Image (tube, coloured by chain):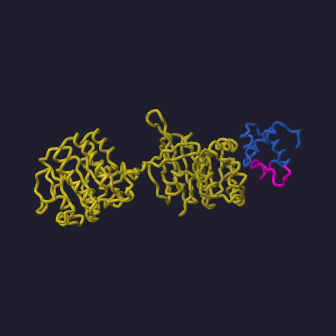
Chain colours: A blue, B yellow
Amino acid sequence: MNFTINLPLQMECTLFFQENPYMFETLDGIALRLGRKREDIDPVVKQLVSNSLLEKIGDGDQAIYRYIQPDTSSGLV
Amino acid sequence: MNSCTASGIEGLDFVISGGFPTGSTVLVEGLPGTGKTILGMQFLYHGAVDHNEPGIFITFEEFPDQLYAELLAFGWDLKALERANMLRVICISPEILIEQMEQPNGLFENIVNEIGCKRIVIDSVSLFQFASNDLKESRNTLYKLRNILRKLKLTSLLIQESNSSEQSEVPFVNYLVDGVVRLSLKTHLNEYRKRTLEVLKMRGCKITEGEHIYRINEQGIHLVPALSMIEDKTAMQLQSFGSTGIAKLDELLTGGIPKGSCFMLDTNSKANYRYIIASVIVTRLLKGDHVALLLSSLVDLYDLKYLCQLFGLDLDDYVKSGHVIFIEHYERQRPPGYESSTIHAGNMTNQEFKNTINEKLGYASSHRNESGDEWFLYYDLNTIVSQRGKEFVIKYFAEEVSKISSAGMSMLALSNFTEIGYETASFLERTSHGVIKTWVDGSYQYLQVLKSPQGNMSSPFLVENIMTKPFIRLV
């Protein structure tokens, strides 16, 4: 995980998706639900996508983000 | 939509004859705090656990983690159901949901297919209406939503928030859906609040009309259907019913007047009760029962003979065979041959009256035991009140009910509760096993079962005149 980008907000966002694993939201939607600004959330969400914690579906403002559930079947977790 | 999908609430399934029609879209509307979300989740939880039917709960505003925690209080482990692929609690915005529903092989279809979804709850569709200022656009969105749910054959509950208890106009969505269930909170006994559920619409389903009280307890929503009382097992032990001759009334009483029970017919001055009485008496005589009739001032033996004739029964035959006894308080003309079957009670003191009836009914009781014949009694209580006074009726009626019950006979007593006064009426109502009320209000006559040993009550039925016997029909 890249720790260079707003770590507390990364944790907040990760926890939010972990606790609500079937959340499907746009960037604006995530910002609204977390009570944060879009410009602060944007780089954090991009980071979580590159870390394979979130999946991005679609493009542009209407792109949706969803949580990728960890694979617990391999027995490694 | 022939099959039913159980709602997860036993009382509600009773009210809608088994459950929501499978594949239907049902609106659940109510003010905040009425338990709409609980009802929705109860529907999904029991669908998954009891019927192996996976479900989806879509929430637009509440976060799933809050729902997981809150609904655990009812013992519903939603996370465990999600792990078992029996449930998905999806948090999404209304616009994205519609967008994804429209897309072939979009997120929505994928999730439905992934878990083999059969049930869905959307909490709440009010947001579709708020999302757009354009009425046409929000109507189209809801119409599309309903069509997609129908296409996927999902039994769907759409939760709708009400803003006030009295809606001035019916929302558009109410016309679109197959059913509407309304949850309300009302003042009860001045200091309390009661929660009521009413099914306003349910296409393809016979519903029990009325407002049904429900409670939210540790297992979720528990609904007690209205017009249900506790069965009187003491009056039902003989498990034998005497038909009233009126099909709908028999249906309401699950067969008719139970053997060993006493029913009261409370009528107001305008109501026509003669066909009801005649139907009951004729049906008993045709069945082969013995009947004792205490006549009123308004119906003499000629009237009775004529009424029986209308019902296709020649009363003369039953007089001759000794199947019928008349108790007469008035000096009136009677048809030839009826004298030997008539007890003249007009000049009797109260004690003499009691003794005579005791003797006759004692005869009836022992006669019944010897021959296996059944006895049915019809009393005009207003006549006894006017001839012998209220005090006598109160004491006498309680004794009669007791004797009749223990002898396994049955009785129908006619009375006008308004005429005899509140106190006496309350006593008679309490003493009787069953109470049927008929009254005229405006241009219509109504009939309602208020009490029965079967535990059944009914809503008021319209009494319609028909040309063939029994000459009335309950609608």
Q: As drawn, is B145 to the left or to the right of A22?
A: left
Q: Considering depth in this image, is B430 or B206 the residue closer to the camera? A: B430
Q: Nearer the viewer, residue A28 or B67?
A: B67
Q: Quadrant of residue B291?
A: bottom left
Whether B276 is drawn above or below B125: the answer is below
Q: Residue at x 26, y 50 (%)?
A: B414
Q: Which residues are magenta?
A: A54-77
Could you say where residue B431 lies in the image, as x and y percent from the top left?
Answer: 32, 45
Q: Is residue B211 visible?
A: yes
Residue B411: % across, % down: 28, 53
**Which corner quadrant holds the C terminus of chain B?**
bottom left
Determine whether, in the image, residue A46 is placed left or right of residue B166.
right
Residue B262 position within the rendered picture, expressed as x and y whole percent measured from the top left: 31, 51
Question: On the rendered image, what quadrant is the N terminus of chain B found in?
Answer: bottom right
Q: Nearer the viewer, residue B294 or B141?
A: B294
Residue B439, visible in the rendered structure:
no
Percent position (x, y) of residue B247?
Answer: 35, 61
Toward which corner of the image does residue B236 lie, by quadrant?
Answer: bottom left
Q: Residue A67 lies in magenta, yes or no? A: yes
